[in-house]
Image (cartoon, rainbow, N blue to C red):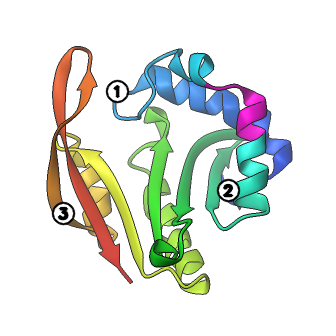
C-alpha cells in the first residue's frame, strides 16, 4: 500500500538515496547519474529541507511503499513579494511505480496545499517528448504556455521543454 506524507528531517537519508536512484534510472530529471553527489551533499539537502520546507514556505511530499520512498513532489514557492503567489513544481516517481495513480494523488494533495497557502499559479517544465508526464500534467489542469527550445542537453542531444502552468 502506498502512503503519502510530508517529508520530515528523519526521512532525509532515505530521500537522498531515493533521489540518487531516480537520477540513475531516468533522463527526465535534472541530474545525470552520480552528478548529484558532485554538486551537493546530504547535509546541504538537510539544510535546504529544514530552511525551506519545515521552517519555510515550500511543499515537499513523499510517497512510500513498504517503508521505501518511491516518489516525491516539491513546490518551491516564489521568494519575492511579486511572485509569492507562485510555486515551481518538481515531481519524480520511480519507473516501477509509474502509472499507478501516485502522480495524480500528488497533484491532488498539492492543490490542497496551494489553496491553503494562497498559491494562485503552479508552474513546471517537461521535456517535449515525455508524453506520459505531459499527459499527467494536462490531466491535473496544467496548460502548455510555451516551448523552451534547446533548454537541456541530454546524452549529447539538445532537448526542448514545454513550460506549463496551472492557474488556481
Which marked residue is nearer to the observer: mark 1 or mark 2? 1
| Residue 45 lies in the magenta stretch | yes
In which quadrant of the rendered view does residue 138 lie? bottom left
| Percent x, y of residue 5 | 71, 60
> With respect to residue 134, does 128 lie above or below?
above
Q: Residue at x 63, y 63 (%)?
A: 58
In which quadrant of the rendered view does residue 135 lie? bottom left
> With respect to residue 74, does 155 lie above or below?
above
Outermost residue, right side: 10
| Percent x, y of residue 27 | 34, 27
| Percent x, y of residue 114 | 53, 77
On the question of residue 33 being in view, the answer is yes
Answer with left or right where residue 10 lies relative to residue 163: right
Q: Residue at x 24, y 56 (%)?
A: 163
Circle 1: element type: loop
Pointer 2: what residue?
A: 3
Q: Earlier in the sequence, mark 3 or mark 1?
A: 1
Classify 10 Å Cα crowding around label 2: few (below 14), some (14-19), many (20 and above).
Answer: few
> With respect to residue 39, does 10 lie above or below?
below
Pointer 3: what residue?
A: 144
Q: Which residues are magenta?
A: 40-46
Amino acid at each position: 500500500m502506498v502512503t503519502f506524507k510530508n517529508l520530515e528531517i528523519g526521512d532525509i537519508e532515505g530521500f537522498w538515496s531515493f533521489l540518487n536512484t531516480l537520477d540513475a534510472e531516468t533522463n527526465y530529471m535534472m541530474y545525470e547519474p552520480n552528478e548529484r553527489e558532485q554538486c551537493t551533499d546530504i547535509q546541504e539537502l538537510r539544510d535546504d529541507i529544514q530552511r525551506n520546507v519545515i521552517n519555510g514556505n515550500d511543499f515537499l511530499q513523499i510517497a512510500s511503499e513498504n517503508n521505501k520512498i518511491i516518489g516525491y513532489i516539491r513546490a518551491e514557492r516564489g521568494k519575492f513579494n511579486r511572485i509569492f503567489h507562485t510555486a515551481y513544481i518538481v515531481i519524480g516517481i520511480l519507473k516501477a511505480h509509474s502509472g499507478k495513480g501516485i502522480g495524480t494523488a500528488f497533484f491532488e494533495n498539492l492543490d490542497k496545499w496551494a489553496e491553503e497557502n494562497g498559491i494562485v499559479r503552479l508552474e513546471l517544465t517537461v521535456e517535449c517528448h515525455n508524453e506520459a508526464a505531459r499527459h499527467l500534467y494536462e490531466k491535473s489542469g496544467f496548460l502548455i504556455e510555451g516551448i523552451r527550445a534547446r533548454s537541456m542537453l541530454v546524452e549529447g542531444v539538445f532537448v526542448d521543454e514545454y513550460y506549463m502552468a496551472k492557474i488556481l
